[in-house]
Image (spheres, grey):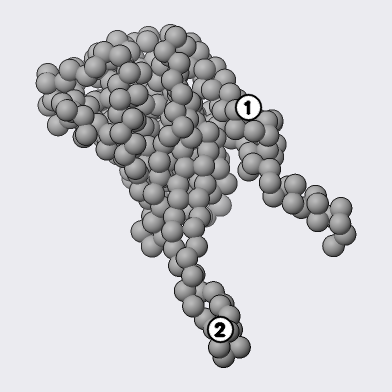
Amino acid sequence: MTLDQGNNSAAAASEPWFSKPNVDVLFYRVNRRPIGGDPSLFDPPPDLLDHLRRVLAVSAPGHSGRKYRRTWQLGSLEFDEQAGTFTGRLGWARSASVLGQVWDSETHEWRDRLVPKDDSAVAPVAFSLNGRILGVLKHPSFTTEAVLDDVLTEILNGGERQMEFPTTSWGVEPLGDQGDFYAWLDSVDQLLLLRLVFERPNPDGEPEFDALFARLDRYEADQIKEEIRARDQTSGLQKEAVKNDPTTKGFLVAALDHAFGRIWAKGKRNGRAATYDQRQRVQRLSIDDVGSDWNTATEAVLDAVSKRGLEHGKTSKRGELLDGSGTTSPL
């Protein structure tokens, strides 16, 4: 290796992981629901941003993994009350032991010994009250995207439990992409199973969900779950029905566009199993250049979240949702 090559390698190693082009921002929605599921007893703080500030000030950790357990923290927070936003960093750390070689000066031998090894990964995050959208810059180690909504939900609920009067069950849930789902649907030869879940939205959420609220209340339920299975495994479900059935379309809009539920589907493509999991196909935006320092990267995530919040408002005005009577109504 030449001196120039060594210098270039050292410079590359010192650059932050996000300095490479085409880094994805993953979009989630922050939901507040009543503890115990009873909306009549739910009286959350009216200022959502201040509520988040107080809960996150406790700095409760989240966890993931079994064999190789990771501890997650959300910190380095900066709140902007006027803009209705906050930024910060989400990361995990792990301490483990690996087999290493150590020198024994008495015997002049190399010996095997377990030595500590620390590992970590951190990514910029941003939140906007507009649409209650949370964006996370996808670190290369975030290979299982479903982990992110789990740990963020755990962090918020851990902080809530330490409040003097806990009121809220927090949920950080992945936004989906209708175009991505329908592209997957068209790509499979047979659709064998479609699982649709609608969960109680925020009581401070959009009024267009009032009919679905009412349906949940009539049943005293906290979620509605529908599972559609193919009668014939060879022909599968009718995919056109998925695209045109009002009830199914209502579920899809609620889950994918608003993160008030989730979609899971199973089919076959060229004789092989193919699945669609909203938690693993989070809505995202690829950014060509987020900059080479933490400030510019964080600003890029905040800008993406703010734009997604504006798009959410437009989608809410033109979409359709189930009105509780088996038909659809404009949002």
For residue 152, above or below residue 303: below
Task: List the residue tagged with mark 2.
Answer: 104
**Dot 2: element:** strand
For residue 137, above or below residue 296: below
Q: Work out which quarter of the rendered image holds the N terminus and state it.
A: bottom right
Percent x, y of residue 40: 12, 18
Seen at 63% across and 27% down, the residue is 296
Q: What label does residue 120 carry, if any?
A: none
Query: Callout 1: 10 Å neighbours few (<14), some, many (20+)?
Result: some
Q: Amino acid at mark 2?
A: Asp
Seen at 50% across and 50% down, the residue is 120
> Considering depth in this image, is 261 or 119 the residue closer to the camera?
119
Percent x, y of residue 304: 56, 23
Q: What label does residue 296 carry, if any?
A: 1
> Considering depth in this image, is 52 or 211 the residue closer to the camera?
52
Residue found farthest to the bottom: 107
Q: Disc 2 vs disc 1: which is toward the camera?
A: 2
Residue 79 appears left or right of 231: right
Percent x, y of residue 3: 86, 57
Q: Amino acid at mark 1?
A: Thr
Residue 221 appears left or right of 235: left
For residue 299, above or below residue 9: above
**Dot 1: element:** helix
Q: Work out which quarter of the rendered image holds the C terminus and state it.
A: top left
Residue 32 found in image quarter: top left
- What distance separates the C-alpha of mark 2 from that of mark 1? 48 Å
For residue 260, above or below residue 152: above
